[in-house]
Amino acid sequence: MGSFGASALRLLGLMAQVAGWRPGEFWEATPADAAAVLAAWLPDTGAEGMDRGRLAAMMEQFPDG
């Protein structure tokens, strides 16, 4: 498992790709904000919401850099 910093940078990159967030917007957002954006982006999540597996799959599909 990576460090918080490494994980945050990966999520920042993902949110930049998916939602067009800049770093300031990412750091001002709450985890619920990010989850809502990701849930809306993946319509098949339904009531299940976003879990670690779905987030990992999305991060693999859209890698940073």
Image: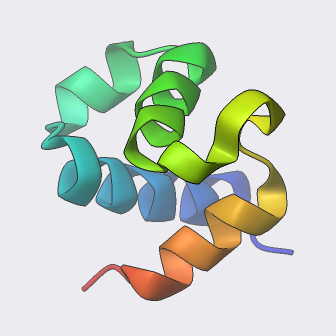
Q: Answer left or right for 42 relative to 17.
A: right
Residue under the image location 12 percent in, 43 percent down: 20
- Image quarter for residue 7? bottom right
Q: Answer left or right for 16 relative to 9.
A: left
Vertical placement of 30 versus 47: above or below?
Answer: above
Query: Where does residue 15 sit, x and y in percent of width and height?
Result: 33, 48
Relative depth, front residue between 40 and 18: 40
Residue under the image location 33 percent in, 30 percent down: 26
The image shows a total of numbered marks equal to 0
Vertical placement of 28 versus 64: above or below?
Answer: above
Residue under the image location 53 percent in, 85 percent down: 60
Query: Where does residue 36 sit, x and y in percent of width and height?
Result: 51, 23
Q: Quadrant of the N terminus?
A: bottom right
Query: Where does residue 39 sit, x and y in percent of width and height?
Result: 54, 36
Relative depth, front residue between 42 and 15: 42
Q: Quadrant of the C terminus?
A: bottom left
